[in-house]
Amino acid sequence: MEHRLSLLVPLAFGAVFGLAAGLAGAPVLVALCLTLPMALTLAWADVLRRRAGLVSVAGGWVLAVLLVLTSLAILAVLGFPAVGSGALMLAALLAPYVRRRRPRSPQSSSPSASSSSLVMLLALAALPLAFWGESLWSASAGIAGGGPQRIWQDWYFHGVLIDMLGQGGLHPVHDLRGVGLPLAPYHYLGYGLVGWLSALGGARGIDLAFVIWWPLGMLLLLAAASEWVFRLRPERPWLALALPLTLFWPDAAGLGSGQTFLGWHWLQTISPGSLYGCAVALLLASWLHGRRQDPAARPVWSLLVLLAGLAVAMLFKAQIILLAGPVLLFWWALTLPGPAFRRGMIVTGLTLLALLVLLWLPLPGLPLIHLGGGGWREYWPDLLFLQAPGWLAGLRAPALAPIVILVGTLGWMVLGILAWPRAPRAVRVWMLLVLGGYLLFALGLDLDKRGSAGTPEELQHRPLVWVLPMWWLTTAPFLVPSSDRPQGRRGWGLAAVLLVLVVGCVAGIRLGPEIQRGPAKIDGRPALPKGLVEAAAHIRQHARPGDVCQGADADPGFRLTALAACTPYWIGFNLHPRSSAAVRVRADEWQRMAALPPPERLEALRRAGIRWYSAGPLSMVDGSPFAPDDPRLPMEPAFRSGDAYVVYQLLP
């Protein structure tokens, strides 16, 4: 009976996640399906905590979620049915309770007792999360109405990627630009859960990205932050609850710096994959610090595990790990126990290897990592161009670039430097590595203009999503002085948590609705034509599973494909000299078809297996005033909107 009751705790935990997703707008079936993986993560959280050497159930839960995401993504890539993946998760959930026949050991605790701090953290985080995510909760309704949008344009890309994983049972998982193309290297693991929910629940990927992918990433970051803070200050457990919630406080951009491009809240909202990379990096940092404190730990074994963890973490968010990885490796070397000579030799070896990569050896398949000062020459002028009126506007001298980047990123969190006198040596080393590594990437690395999946400044810019929480969560615990007096400790801790929560909620109410506005000089939220929405809705309503669709303009913004949740033949996005041969061939095939006279074009589209073809007066994504030709076909449209969008059904 005790084991059956203990199973109810993770099931209730999962049901709460399902209920929250339903309240945020997820379909009922999706909300019900979400219960299973989230119950599984709590059921295994404490076991994974103990086996991995983590210090809190929050850390164990993060590890469990990451393992579930990884497993689901791999199964989707292999074409494993979503129902089969669900059966495997159900078996993993029940296995410990079926096998348990002997009494619980004295040192073990019940799931409800061991997970109480995690549940409290997630429950408290739900309120500011609701306010900060307001632009996402209302996004599906805004899309349905067309017109001006409050979401950043990248959400359509994420929606297509989720649909691609969800349709792995119908088409082999492919480059998201076209069915049948070889899968391109990308950080797919963070999409595993929403891809599975898309396959099982039939929801559009873009809707799942709004109501599940982003909030889960935020909760993972907060739980990993709690693990890290508790590792640093275990004698102050309330800090592990209060400090993660300070991430809901306004950043420098929210306080009027005028440098929105360095805004943490904006960037993590429009690029939620970074949150998953941050959670992995925080977890690895906590594990490594725990190994350093363990006199029985073997440094070589720690290094091997760290390298393996970083390799997997690259598939969550490469731009985060490309900075966090080297920083963690140098931290491991600089804090090695034993003779100083051995430590110096290892640090020297790592430094020479880093210089080899930075100066002469480009890493294949990754963004350009070359130390040539390009950030100072090009990224810094870009920041000045994007600077809006604010308290950073007057700092434009090149010598001030490091100050502007640090203050524009960290804002009031630069106060963490005051923790230096109280911080242990290992933490001081870590503080220097985090800030030094960030500035090296931002100002030292050249921009990648070779053509890739990302933007030229991605290694200068994206790591700030990790740098801000890593810096603050490392330094803030040591701003609180040590004390041997237990009187009043619990009361002060409770008051601090409530204060942090109130400030986070007020900030979310004020900044959340327009957090995706971004820099004023970047038009990242193009209006959505009503006819495009209606055309996509017609395709989605009438399409059969596995149907292939195509936009007449090749849908470079992913909008038709994401809104119709269909499999594309070709999306004309990011074609560059380094694109694979298969991608270039597909692009050439599409150009040839588009240039044919309408009767021949119709036959070519049918031979390509395209069932749905949409055309309309679409303006280019880059804002060009020149609309593409109106490529009508010599047949009656299956749908025609009031603003000249049409949909053709090419195959029965």
Image: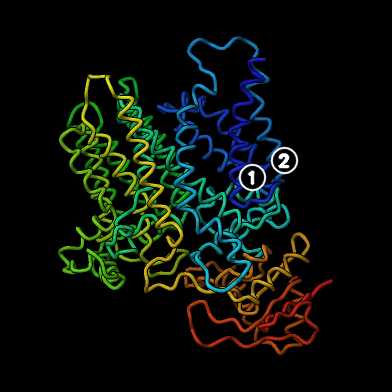
**Which image quadrant is residue 547 in?**
bottom right
- The answer to whether any part of residue 460 appears in the image is no
Assign a secondary structure to mark 2. Answer: helix
**Residue type (three-letter) at the residue carrying disc 2:** Gly
Nearer to us: label 2 or label 1? 2
Instruction: Say which label, 2 or 1, has the lower sequence index.
Output: 1
Residue 504 screen position, x and y as percent: 38, 47
Residue 232 screen position, x and y as percent: 30, 31
Residue 49 screen position, x and y as percent: 47, 27
- The numbered disc on residue 84 is 2
Describe residue 300's horizontal placement relative to residue 340 as left or right: right
**Residue type (three-letter) at the residue carrying disc 1:** Leu
Question: CB under 8 Å between callouts 2 and 1?
Answer: yes
Instruction: Look at the picture and state if 112 lies above or below 137.
Output: above
Which residue is found at the position 50% from the left and 66% from the top? 150
Q: On the image, numbered disc 1 is attached to which residue?
A: 75
User: Could you tell me which quadrant the C terminus lies in?
Assistant: bottom right
Along the line of sight, the residue nearer the viewer: 604 or 351: 604
Describe residue 465's horizontal placement relative to residue 403 as left or right: right
Which residue is found at the position 61% from the left and 38% from the top? 37
